Each structure stands twice: as C-alpha cells, then as structure tokens.
Image: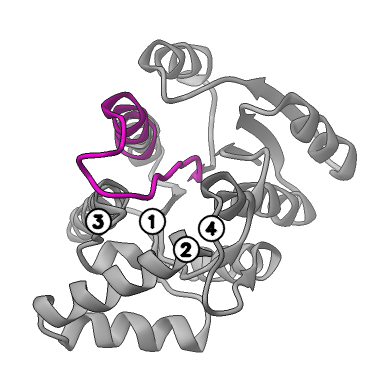
Amino acid sequence: MLALITGASSGIGYEIAKELDKKGYNIIAVGRNKERLEKLKNECINDVNIEVIDLSDRENVDKLVSKYKDIDIDILVNSAGIGAIGDFNEIELKQELEMINLNIVALHILTKVFLDKMIKKDKGYILNIASSAAFSSGPLMATYYATKSYVYRLSCGINKELKKKKKDVTVSVLCPGPVDTNFNNNLNIKYSVKPISAKYVAKYSIEKLFKKKQVIIPGIKNKLAVFFSKILPESILSSVIYNIQAKKMIS
C-alpha cells in the first residue's frame, strides 16, 4: 500500500503521513524542508521515500508526475499550501501567483493524473486539504480564501461524478478551522481562538476518508462556524471575517 503526500514536511501533511504509516502504508513524502522530511522518515515504521521539491513551480510538479505517474498510488493527499494576509492591492503579485500555483494548480494536476489511474483500477482515495475558509469570501486574505473555495468545489464536483459512475474511488475534502501548524508562524499571526492540534485533524480526517466522507470538518466549533457561514448574509459574514483577520494582523 502506497500513499503520496504533499506538504509532508510539516503540519497536517506531516501528521497524516504518520497516521498512514501506522496503518501499514509506505509513504512518498513531498515537501520543501529536507530536515523535517528526514525526521518524518526516522519516525515512521514503513518505507518513506523523500522528495524535496517546491510545487509552486510548475516544472517541479511535472517532474513529480513524470516520476510517479506509472506507480500504483493507493492514496493521494494534497496537503501543500501557503497563504498571505493583508489588503489585496498591497500583497505582491509574485507571492499570490505562487499561492495559486501551489494551492490550486499543483493540486489540480496531481488530482487529475492520479485520479485517472485510480478510476482505471476502480480503487483509491484522494484527500484534498481545503479550509473552513472555503465557505466564504476572505477580506484581508482574499486570494487564500478563493484558492480554498476552488479546492472545496473541485473536490465535491469530482466526487459526485465518481458516485454517478459507481466507482470505488473517493475524493474527500478536509475543511479544518484554526490548526496549530507552521502556517500561523509563517504569516506571523495569532488566532483569537485556541487552534486544534494537527495530530487530531490528521487522525480524524483519515478515519473519515476511509468511511468515504465527502466533506470532512473536524471539531464541533468548526462545524458550527461552517454552519453559520452558510446562513449568514455575505455582507455580515465578510465584515465578521474582516474584523477577525484585522485582529490577527495587530497581534
């Protein structure tokens, strides 16, 4: 059994790799931090093949696909992602394009390539990591929220196609709220609520993935937040989100 996991050098991707290792999966761990990937390899029981690569570069995505397209992947986890906070006009275009390339383009390509192989053998799982940000607009993190909305809509649409075809392949989308990962440190922000652990999110998401749950939302508070984001008028919701993001920046 083999799982390919992007963003495996930290956070949710790192913990998902450890969770799947416990279940007997060999891992292809993709990330940018070699030291962290080596640490992951040493902590796992089964084989871990390390790929130190930046998937925000399209050429690197193509290289990864070329290397593993003929390998039998049982589980694909698209966990790699980055964000940016600030007014849309003030964030550098280069930074936003890197975000779009990683959060959307790389995920889209890997999903498409490995899904096709899974459909042909009529077996497999894909877990795409979105966010509770997928359910609303995101002033002060507009591009990030938009990328996660793309991941959510794409995953749900594909999964419905698979059900109509009666294929034994599942595309699930994970939509966590605040999680204690390096994502927060990289943006230099603090959450106003206590984030849940990446370890808990990983265990919960894998449990639900194997139960073929389409949308995975860990934590009662996060489930409530998603519920209210669906019923509140957009004008009110965006104002609430703006205030939350502004407080993060002040912190």
Which portion, as a residue range, is magenta? Answer: 77-104
Q: Is residue 17 left or right of residue 73?
A: right
Secondary element at tag 1: loop
Q: Is residue 89 left or right of residue 203?
A: left
**Amino acid on which the number 2 mark rests in the picture:** Ile
Mark 1 surroundings: few (<14), some (14-19) or many (≥20) residues within 10 A: many
Disc 3 is placed on an element classified as: helix
Residue 131 position (above or below residue 8): below
Front position in the image: 194 or 216: 194
Mark 2 or 1, nearer chain start: 1
Q: Nearer the viewer, mark 3 or mark 4?
A: 4
Q: Position of residue 207 (x, y in %)?
A: 59, 70
Question: Percent x, y for residue 8?
Answer: 64, 40
Q: Are marks 1 and 4 in contact (CB under 8 Å)?
A: no
Mark nearer the N terminus (1 vs 4): 1
Q: Position of residue 27 (x, y in %)?
A: 69, 37
Q: Nearer the viewer, mark 2 or mark 4?
A: 2
Mark 2 or mark 4: whose residue is earlier in sequence: 4
Query: Residue 189 bears which disc, if any?
Result: 4
Tell me, for residue 149, which label it has, or none.
3
Mark 1 = which residue? 130
Q: Label 3 vs label 2: CA separation? A: 26 Å
Q: Are marks 3 and 1 in contact (CB under 8 Å)?
A: yes
Which residue is drawn at the image coordinates 68% and 47% (left, top)?
Answer: 14
Mark pair 3, 4: CA separation:
21 Å
Disc 2/disc 4 C-alpha distance (Å): 8 Å
Q: Write down the residue under mark 2.
A: 250
Q: Nearer the viewer, mark 1 or mark 4?
A: 4
